[in-house]
Amino acid sequence: MDLVTPGFGLVFWTIITFLCLLFILRKFAWKPILGAVEDRENGIKSALASAENARKEMENLKADNERILNEARAEREAMLKDAREIKNKMISDAKDQAQEQANKMIEQAQAAIESEKKSAMLELKKQVAEISIDIAEKVVREELSNKDKQLKLVESMLSDAKLN
Amino acid sequence: MTITGIAAIGAGLAAIGAGLGIGKIGGSAMEAMARQPEMHGKIQTSALILAAFVEAVALFGVVVALLQG
Amino acid sequence: MTFSTFRNTLFLVLSLSFSFAVFAGEASENPKKEKFDAKEMIMHHVKDAHEFHIIDINGKPVSISLPIILWTDNGLVTFMSSAFHHDDSGHHIVEKNGMKFVKYHENIYQLTDGAHAIEFDADHHPINAKKPWNFSITRNVFMMWVSAIVLILLFVTAARSYNKSEGNVPKGIAGFVEPLVVFVRDEIARPMIGEHKYKKYMPYLLTIFFFIWINNIFGLIPILNGANLSGNIAFTMVLALFTFIITTVSGNANYWKHIFWMPGVPVAMKLFLMPIELIGIFTKPISLMIRLFANITAGHIIILALMSLIFIFETVLIAPVSVAFSLFITVIEIVVTAIQAYIFTILSALYFGMATEEEHH
């Protein structure tokens, strides 16, 4: 019975001691210790977060680099393609032009040849005519020096020309 | 039989009850821990709390016995 | 480093427990022929005392005298407990300020005028004396102050060491203390009360945890003669009372609703549950009080009872057995010191958590 009856004096002193202890420890022990632990945890957390951020930034940077590299590569590709196209175009243009020029020259040459040919023909015709007249003159002269022959000729001509 | 003797028997009965209860809790906790070792900490905490509750009932009996003795 | 510190502490406690066996043996080896009363010896050790009895040498008790403070009808009376000359049977009368005091079974009585010895009626109520208000610095109060000073030294030193170190790294004693503090925070307060509200209760939980633990341990140290503070119902009552007050004060609307008008059950059940829950408010702290008291006291009683076997059987042959058994029990008790402090703290935290839980249906 005595064992389970709280003694008044001990209750009194326990209340006082406990309250003092709670107050002192709260102020001088729990607050600094918990504060230090929390600070450290926060520090670790923020360090981890910043490491994570740095990693992400690194990744971003890498991705950026990759992107820029890709862009540059694409640009180079495009430029090369353009250059090739321009080259091809220039070549084909030059070819066309040359072709045209050549055609023109051929045409001109052909025209010149044609006109030369025509004038040569004309000359030839003229000379042939002159020569034929000369020949005819000479023949006629020779023929007409002989009366028989003249008559014969006339006769053959007339026979050729009869009944026409 | 004196009242003290009866009180002692009462305390003994309370101890039997608590023993059965805590035994059951301990056995189940062990089984649970064996089944799920990764939950070890949580099971242990719950088992301790439950054992404390069971024990409290027995201790009430013991205190009643003490009051008589 | 933490582990080795802990191991050293454990070893110290163990070796002291062992020396207890030696002291207990010596203490009772005096050649008194009176019959050994185990119950009286055990009760004497388990209960509070007005002097710090250390050892008997050749039948003469060696003890530290403690101040006795009484509040009588005629005002405050103080004298040292040595004035009683170790008398506990109510025969030695101390006169002070014209009043006569006797000590009987560690209770101090003020004799009425003309009485020369205390007398009791059949119900053990004193006939010719009354009890003054007793504020004496008893053995338990003394040990409580010692433990409080040890706690303050330990934790304030630990807290100071953080300021000296760079980046809040725990050094020296803080390395030993910090895991325990973090344990209370992460294993007790956070899961039981909840992430958002636990901070408010941390100082209280930490204080009761370490206060109970250190007093449990001090109770086991035999040279202090097992000042059984945490096994004293007055001490546990005060701590349980604090838990009760904090729970009741911090109880929110949801908590009271669950007590007076349990949501989610039929009306008949609500009416049935109300008295149960209402009683539950009080049984929770009472069970806290009794659990700590009974566990610690039971441990002391068992160790002392095993020791008493030597004197009950009046042979030294039983000594190895009882020493071995009491060593075994002492080791278990060392575990129990921590477990009971943990249980008290975690249940307090659980009650705070119940009181502050928000509605979430």
Image (cartoon, rainbow, N blue to C red):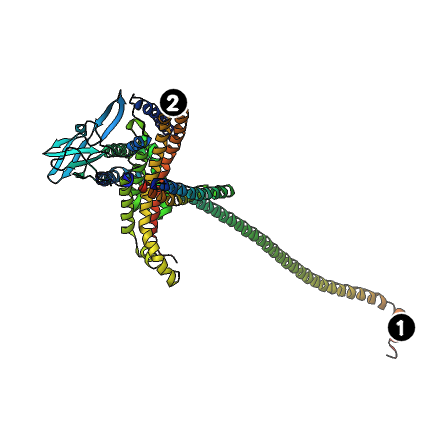
Mark yes or no: residue C182 visible: no
Q: Quadrant of residue C113?
A: top left
Relative horizontal placement of residue C349, taking residue A14 as reference (left or right) = right
Name the residue beneath numbered marker 1: A156
Of tags 1 and 2, the one toward the viewer is 2
Q: Is residue C248 above or below residue C299?
A: below
Q: x and y percent of residue C304 in the render?
A: 34, 30
Amino acid at pointer 1: Ser
- Name the quarter where the C terminus of chain C is drawn: bottom left
For residue C278, the mark is none
Mark yes or no: residue B26 visible: yes
Q: Nearer the viewer, residue C264 or A21?
A: C264
Q: x and y percent of residue C43 in the render?
A: 30, 33
Q: Nearer the viewer, residue C18 or C11?
A: C18
Q: Few, some or many C-alpha atoms within 10 Å of disc 2 (few <14, some 14-19, many ≥20)?
A: few
Q: How many marks?
A: 2
Q: Quadrant of residue C36?
A: top left
* Residue at (31, 46) in percent of width and height: C285
- Name the quarter where the N terminus of chain C is drawn: top left
* Residue at (23, 26) in percent of width and height: C63
* Residue at (65, 60) in percent of width and height: A107
Asked if the residue at tag 2 contacts the one at tag 1, i.e. Cβ–Cβ closer than 8 Å, the answer is: no
Q: Is residue C59 above or below residue C181?
A: above
Q: Nearer the viewer, residue A59 or C119?
A: C119
Q: x and y percent of residue C101 in the render?
A: 15, 34
Q: Nearer the viewer, residue B30 or C332?
A: C332
Relative horizontal placement of residue C270, taking residue A155 as reference (left or right) = left
Subunit that carries the residue with mark 1: A
Subunit that carries the residue with mark 2: C
